[in-house]
Image: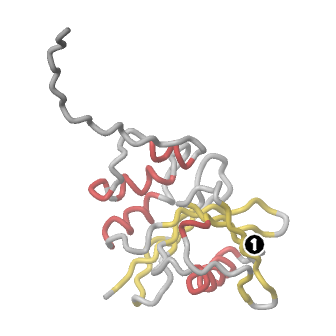
Amino acid sequence: MMTTILFPSGPVFAEQSALRLSLNTVLHQQGTIDGAWWPRTRDAGTELPALISAVDQRLGRAVLRVGLHVDAWDHIPRRIQAPGRQVRVAWFRSADPHLITLSFAGTSPVSLLVIPPRTAAGPAIAALTRAVADTFGVRPADLLRAAAPEESSPAQDGSASWENEGGRVTEPAPERPATRLRPVTH
């Protein structure tokens, strides 16, 4: 099976073991994401070394720190071994669970949309493609929803996104069973 890897120069076809990553040709645009990554598992310790290596090579600079949402990943190590250095891994509950941030020395961090590992190939490739298009002001959850509208969360009103931004989603009040009114006698 062939996997599409999207780079700014266009699609490159590789074996299934290749990293699934797209990076924008112009990085660090305020209000946008810089690309997307489609990991194979939720195991950060397994997935991050290949991502760090690919980004190092593609951008020609060394990733020094990775930031991610703690609930979106399993097995999050404190550090990842990379050539000539250890990359620190920080995890947060306040970060967007659909993003991963890569930090470098002397430049702005790179933000990547994380496509859930179990996403079907068609929607995942669509999200990889959309992530390097004009994404100004588009929330990561909206990019994922646009790539796979049939798989989107039941909260179509945006309340789930609002919760990720610090709000609170409340469950609808359960319906009460109908009660019969009894006549009052004195």
Tell me if mark 1 has few (under 14), some (14-19) or many (20+) residues whose alpha carbon lies within 10 angstroms of its own.
Answer: some
Above or below residue 126? Residue 172 is: above
What x and y, as percent, mark residue 157?
38, 38
| Viewer-closest of 133 and 179 | 179
What x and y, as percent, mark residue 67?
68, 67
| Viewer-closest of 4 and 169 | 169
What x and y, as percent, mark residue 91?
68, 67
Quarter of the image with the C terminus is top left
**Residue 178 in view:** yes
Above or below residue 176? Residue 19 is: below
Q: Secondary structure at mark 1?
A: strand
Judge left or right: residue 106 versus residue 29.
Answer: right
Going 53% across and 42% down the picture, which residue do you hit? 168
Q: Label 1 belongs to which residue?
A: 65
> In the image, what residue type sits under mark 1?
Arg
Above or below residue 56? Residue 113 is: above
Quarter of the image with the N terminus is bottom left
Image quadrant in which you'd find residue 51: bottom right
Going 58% across and 45% down the picture, which residue do you hit? 165
Judge left or right: residue 110 versus residue 87.
Answer: left
Above or below residue 170? Residue 182 is: above
Judge left or right: residue 12 versus residue 51.
Answer: left
Going 61% across and 64% down the picture, which residue do you hit? 69
